[in-house]
Amino acid sequence: MAGYDYDLFVIGGGSGGVRAARVAAALGKRVGIAEESRFGGTCVIRGCVPKKLYVYASQFPEHFADAAGYGWTVPEASFDWQTLVASKDREISRLEAIYKKNVEGSGGETFHSRAMIVDPHVVLLLGKDRTVTADQILIATGGRPAAHPALPGHEHCIFSNEAFDLKELPKAIMIEGGGYIAVEFANIFHGLGVDTTLVYRGKEILSRFDMDLRRTLHETMEKKGIKILCHAVSESVSKRTDGRLDVRITGDQVLTVDQAMLAIGRIPNTENMGLEGIGIEMVTATGAIKVDRYSRTNIDNIWAIGDVTNRVQLTPVAIHEAMCFVETVFKNNPTAPDHDTIATAVFSQPEIGTVGLSEDDAVKRFADIEIYRASFRPMRHTLSGRDEKMLIKLVVDGASRKVLGAHILGPDAGEMAQLLGIPLKAGLTKDDFDRTMAVHPTAAEELVTMYKPTYRVKDGERI
């Protein structure tokens, strides 16, 4: 290692890259990290953090309306988009500085530059017109929204990146996509008073989530006033003389909107990094970097973590992979990331929290499945009069009694999913749930008071 400038050089200053750089530097390793944009990456700068802030902002109209049932008189409220954007910018800048400071405080060196790998041990910093050498190289460049160049008028569309910084709040928006990004932004814009239409090519939003959650959220969103058009795609986007957009969708229907947003997936950032030149093996279908179970590429000293590998595109996963990388490379403790039973949330309104297998996936893998399901109006909606149901569902293996999946739609579902991730990861059974005392009155108590299955699915047949 002594013959190189660095023991580790990280390309990409997002959550995974920064974690690897900081922890390795704290071990006394010579670490450099390059980021061409802003430290913090997708999650902090243009993803999870600003999105959650906007989710909070979009929830206030319902809070104001619900307050009346509890005796509050709330004067007519008004919303200022520019204030939200400016407040978000201040918070993001604060977090960005912390990410950079944490690396430098641990002894790492940061570079604001695009980086290319020109040799298995050599990195070119384009912004600095400088090359550095490293014993180990970690690629953590993340991903970006997938473009749609085949769509006529695609140049008039925005992506999630731009949605956070629009000069003004649109009066009407079309969002194409049915994944969690599309669904979350549909709820955000609707909550801020925007006429919102979600267009999705599939038969139901949020593929890969439990079907009960998907259907119930769809129905709830439509009751709120969000228009959802399934089995449909945008076919062209044209700009009008008044600056608005005409979006032609399946069935020759035309939507006139102020903004058209594409949320049709994300792709890894692997272009123009020199990967092909040094022989890094890629996954042809996705453009992702191919890695083994320890995050090592086909070149022994080059590794990759996070969205650029297209394994599981979640910030906590990238951080976990970074910690496993440090264990493997610098602690002589080979550790493979554990991608099984990952809890996740969709910050829709109401939000979704889920961990483990959906009912459909469980039925494919187990001969005897028990479903425990409760649908009810949460207590917070009783005095407000809000007609909105909460859904709690457990998927259980009838043979072993192991809880295979837990799915929640309703207030604080994401918080519940994080806690449910622990017993499901530990492989606890429905009997363990049943002998756990309830916390009353809470919505979460349903998780430990559903003693009899709602129905069973045996050999593919519902009984």
Image (cartoon, rainbow, N blue to C red):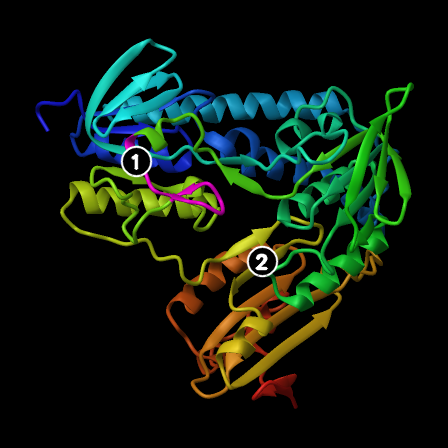
In the image, 207 versus 167, the foreground residue is: 207
Residue 330 lies in the magenta-colored region: no
Query: Which residue is disc 2 drawn over?
Result: 353
Q: Which mark is residue 189?
A: none
Q: Residue at x 24, y 40 (%)?
A: 299
Element type at mark 2:
strand
Specify start and end residues of the magenta stretch as a single range.
278-289
Q: Quadrant of residue 361?
A: bottom right
Q: Residue at x 78, y 55 (%)?
A: 230
In the image, 444 versus 103, the foreground residue is: 103
Q: Quadrant of the C terminus?
A: bottom right
Q: Is residue 24 above or below residue 96?
A: below
Query: Where residue 250 sits in the image (x, y, percent)?
Result: 84, 48
Query: Which residue is disc 1 drawn over?
Result: 279
Q: Is residue 159 left or right of residue 382?
A: left
- Can residue 74 be seen in this snapshot? no
Q: Residue at x 21, y 27 (%)?
A: 121
Mark 2 is on which residue type?
Answer: Gly
Q: Residue at x 40, y 66 (%)?
A: 425
Q: Earlier in the sequence, mark 1 or mark 2?
A: 1
- Can residue 69 be seen in this snapshot? yes
Mark 1 is on which residue type?
Answer: Gly
Q: Is residue 421 above or below residue 351?
A: below
Which residue sits furthest left?
2
Q: Quadrant of residue 48?
A: top right
Element type at mark 1:
loop
Q: Is residue 404 left or right of residue 146?
A: left
Dot 1 surroundings within 10 Å: few (below 14), some, or many (20 or more)? few
Q: CA distance from mark 1 to mark 2?
A: 40 Å
Dot 2 surroundings within 10 Å: few (below 14), some, or many (20 or more)? many
Query: Where residue 57 sits in the image (x, y, percent)?
Result: 70, 36
For the residues bearing labels 1 and 2, Cβ distance under 8 angstroms: no
